[in-house]
Image (cartoon, rainbow, N blue to C red):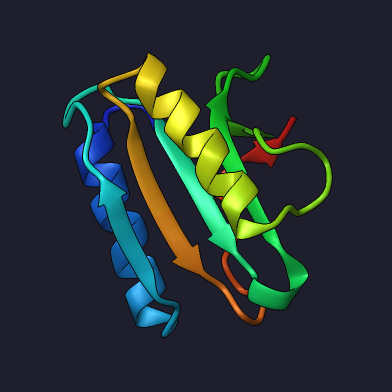
Amino acid sequence: MVMGLTTGLWVSAQVRICDRAFIPATVVRRGDPDAGTVLLKINRFEAGVTVYTQASSMDDGPAWSRGTGPSPVAEAEADAYIARQVARDPDLWVLEIEDHKGQYQLDGKVV
C-alpha cells in the first residue's frame, strides 16, 4: 500500500473514489486491517475479469501484477483464483470493482 496508509484505509479510499465516479465497488472480503494484502477483482462484464494482486516494484511505489494472467478471464475462473489465494492467506482483502466502461485506474504500475 501507499507508505503510511493501513490496508483498511486504502481499501476504504478506493471504495470512496469509485463511489464518486459512479463505479460500483464492494469489499468482498476483509483481511488484516493494518497490513493485509489486497486482490482487486476488476469486472468488465462482457470484456472479462482481471484479478490484480499487489506486487513489489524497484522504486518502492505501488505495483500490481495480473494474477489471472495477461488476458481477462471468465468470472468463474477469477473467483476460483481468488478462492485459492484466500485459502493460502487468511489476512487477504478482496475488493471487487464493476467497471463497465474501463474508467477505474490502478494506483500503481502493472508489472
**Residue 107 vertical position relative to residue 74 in the rendered view, above or below:** above
Position in image of residue 79 (x %, y %): 51, 46
- For residue 57, what is the image quadrant? top right
Position in image of residue 47 (x %, y %): 76, 70
**Residue 19 vertical position relative to residue 89 in the rendered view, above or below:** below
**Residue ID at (40%, 35%):** 38
- For residue 8, what is the image quadrant? top left
Position in image of residue 1 (x %, y %): 40, 31
**Residue ID at (60%, 58%):** 75
51, 23: nearer the viewer: 51
**Residue ID at (35%, 80%):** 20
37, 110: nearer the viewer: 37
Q: Is residue 5 visible?
A: yes
**Residue 91 vertical position relative to residue 33 in the rendered view, above or below:** above
Q: Is residue 62 visible?
A: no
Determine whether, in the image, residue 42 is placed left or right of residue 24: right
111, 5: nearer the viewer: 111
Determine whether, in the image, residue 96 is placed left or right of residue 26: right
